[in-house]
Image (tube, rainbow, N blue to C red):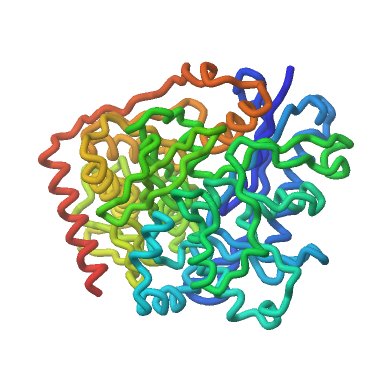
Amino acid sequence: MRYILAIDQGTTSTRAILFDENQNVVKVAQKALTNIFPHPGHVEQDAQEIWLSALSVIQEIFYDGKIKAQEVASIGIANQRETTVIWDKESGQPVYNAIVWQSRQSSYIVDRIKKAGYDNLFKEKTGLLLDPYFSFTKIMWLYENIPGLKNNENLLFGTVDTWLLWKLTGGKVHATDVTNASRTGLMNIAKLDWDDELLKLFDIPRSILPEIKDTAADFGKVLEYYFFAYACPIMSLIGDQQAALFGQSCFKRGESKNTYGTGGFLLINTGASLIKSKHDLLSTVAWKIGNEITYALEGSIFVSGSLIQWLRDSLKIIGKAQDSEAIASSIDDNGGVYIVPAFTGMGAPYWDKKARGLICGLTRGSDHRYLVRAALEAMAYQVKDLLDAVEEDIGYKIDSLRVDGGAASNNFLLQFQSDLLQMPIMRKPMQESTALGAARMAGLKAGVYHYEDFTNDTFTAFEPQKDAEMMNLYYQGWLKAVAKCLKD
């Protein structure tokens, strides 16, 4: 038996998932991560903690000796994409915390670039929008706020995949793949290379940037010291949302998935076509395998599953995230209550970084159940916002939506989503889509898997049960709530 190890490095935890030759999950290890909030709108993590968490979960997979590290054919790494790390290559130490994709601390830099009139140039070259979300703004923030960086010639930049790769290989390999590079705001999405004009415009030296490789490629080997005396090859790096798209077997043009994670991410495979959105959705690289380039359209929701965490940890109106399903199902409707979770601004298709959260429609009869239901509904409304925009961009209707992420286990959410979209919502029995996508990529490169191995996925379908006209009334209430949020 040959195994594939996927390292799924996310916003809230790092996980190692071991897959066998039949894509079955054999073992899972998980380590929670600390999020740091030094100022309002700032979200950071300790890059060393991320690295040590990866080592920890690898050790947990193999420590009992039941499966030998030497039985692993290759490793695939999926990661939180735009999160930015800069480190000194001599000391191996980060110069500052990792700045997380959610963080808005570089907003003033975006305002400055927009004022200079570079919006269209940036979008044309990268497929992205000018927003603090993307890595280049975080690099600029570090250069402008951390003393001594400008004159330090030993610096290296990476998204988390690059940081982990550099550490795992003992500093021998400084590389990324096209999916992660496409999220930095520095890669020309048509040429799949760093764009010199943007680098000059943003005053970012090319010398700090990693080599851009295919998604399935030779990324070097893990130091034997870190992997139980075995130099295991690393054969894939991939952004977490692209990994989920691949793990959901969305290989054909028009196939789409939504991830209900900390944030929400709707991706649709657009094949070899690089589609430029009229609704401020993002054009991104889905993956590159050999000479085959696959693109995607993406809508990003800043707050999705983290809204339920907020109810649990901040408001303390639920004990466990899983409780939300039963609580929301215990009432017949939302009572006119809406939550717009613009805690860090609004993502696609609104892109308003100044928007802030809103709860409206409260009456004396509104208790905690209505807030819980409104939170779950908000997750679904945001997906409809994106799907409507996607369908207008691509010019045809999507007939079903595949889903994953922690909140995809919530039956109330998926049924409401199906009713709202009036289409089947498809959920796999195994929810490890991100890790599976990374494992599939690494397994393809290693020759353990083949494309025909990915054609037998099974799904549970949530079919529409509510009247479309009634669901449209719900949605109109959401749009009115969003309008108040954006107006304020």
Q: Horizontal and vertical percent for residue 129?
A: 38, 61
At a point 42% along the width and 58% down the height, the residue shown is 125
Residue most toward the left?
469
Pick whichever, 343 or 278, lies toward us: 278
Quadrant occupied by the C terminus:
bottom left
At a point 66% along the width and 41% down the height, the residue shown is 7
Q: Is residue 54 above or below residue 356?
A: above
Quadrant occupied by the N terminus:
top right
Pick whichever, 272 or 321, lies toward us: 272
- Would you say residue 32 is visible in this rendering? no
Q: Is residue 252 left or right of residue 68?
A: left
Pick whichever, 8 or 147, lies toward us: 147
At a point 43% along the width and 42% down the height, the residue shown is 259
* Residue 97 figure quarter: bottom right
- Would you say residue 98 is visible in this rendering? yes
At a point 82% along the width and 66% down the height, the residue shown is 91
